[in-house]
Amino acid sequence: MLNRIMTRLGYEKRSTNQAPGGDSYWQDFAALRTGPVNPQTAQGISAVFACVAAISETVATLPLHLYRDTGNTREKARNHPLYRVLHDQPNPEMTAMEYRELATAEVLLTGNHFSRIVRGHDGQVRELWPLSNVQVLRLTNDALAYEYTDRKGKVIRLLEHEVLHLRHRIGPDGVLGISPISVARGVIELAQSEQEHGTATFRNGAKLNGVLETAAVLKPEQRQALKESWANQYGGAGNSGKTPVLEAGLTYKPVSMSLEDAEWIEARKFNVYEVCRLFRVPPVIVGAMESANYSNSVELNRQFVTLTLRRWLTMWEQAIASKCLTEAGRRTYFAEHSVEGLLRGDSTTRAAFYASGIQSGWMKPSEARELENLPPLDGIDDFSTNGGNPPTTPTAPYPSKEAGE
């Protein structure tokens, strides 16, 4: 409370000291991203782009709710300011889906994402703004600070509680996350090389690839003229398949393997699996359908949630609890994604699941309708207490003649 009051009065207290080597790991990490493999060039590989899209788009489109723990039950805290930030709109320029997709994709590609936390006068989070070109500093008091340059060119330093920092696996410094691309850059480089090889092969013509031989001794200008003439007539995909006409004792001798001999296509397929291993994404999710069929599609979706998405969903939920809620707030409120839509399977499986739960007594028909996004029906829970049949209204027996008399 005192810190917030001092901040509003202009007496903000911040440490301006930087510990020696506090940003050395960040500089090393940035150096890794300046080579041929970086987040921009890596996305030119279709498998990388598909893996990042599959994870970030799915995480961003899953409902993220803020719940209030009431002891025996929990309920959505719709009146809490953080609920709107997480579920609807984190800032005036982005929707919740756009913001979470951006943040998740940035963690996948660079290992880190930073967002500035804007709080209201009551200390509650009101806005989240993504930051770029952030440097992390270790101060002399062992606290962390984050520096970035705003649109006006001014360097701004934020303290640890003012930044939502999402990380992939933490690196040796214990602060910054490591990107799969930076760790396994050789896999990306191989995929890039094979892609460039295929592009160059078809650009220069996939049919002819060899040398021209002659017994005569050619002058430098003659060799250059012959080279340019050959490239103009038979080079490029548009000239592929043309029959060359040789003169002056020239012979053409192929010297390289064909695409079939080099198994280029198989190598390209293998690289898809290699990239999927980096991001722990089932190959079926990114369109590699060799091992997919109708019978295992539901199980593959379940694996995608449990083996791939679970880590990223937990990252969001725990980071929100750590940075967006106070110590007292964490004892009452928590954020959680709703993944039932990804796990519920086909209609037959869902119907059997609901029927089993209702008959066993641990689920009510109204709860099943809520999971299916169906409107509530009055009295539907009474059916489960009568064997699934509508309740009957008891009627009085007809009076006997004696009673009538």
Image (cartoon, rainbow, N blue to C red):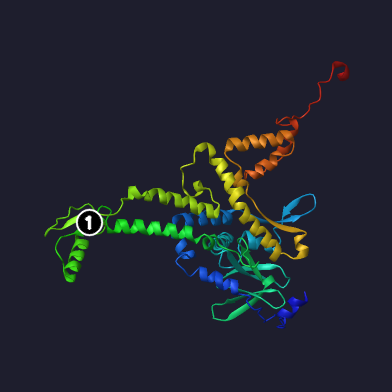
Quadrant hosting residue 68: bottom right
Residue at x-position 80% and y-position 52%:
71
Furthest residue in direction top, as rendered:
401
Mark 1 residue crowding within 10 angstroms, few (<14) / some (14–19) / many (20+):
some
Where residue 282 sits in the image (x, y, percent)?
Answer: 53, 48
Where residue 115 sits in the image (x, y, percent)?
Answer: 61, 68
Q: Is residue 26 left or right of residue 336?
A: left
Give the number of marks: 1
> Is the residue 131 above or below the residue 310 in the image?
below
Q: Which residue is mark 1?
A: 239
Task: Pick the residue in front: 139 or 252.
Answer: 252
Q: Is residue 167 left or right of residue 255?
A: right
Q: Is residue 157 visible?
A: yes
Task: Pick the residue in front: 104 or 124.
Answer: 104
Residue at x-position 61% and y-position 75%:
23
Q: Is residue 375 visible?
A: no
Q: Looking at the rendering, in which quadrant would you find the C terminus?
A: top right
Task: Pick the residue in front: 369 or 61.
Answer: 61
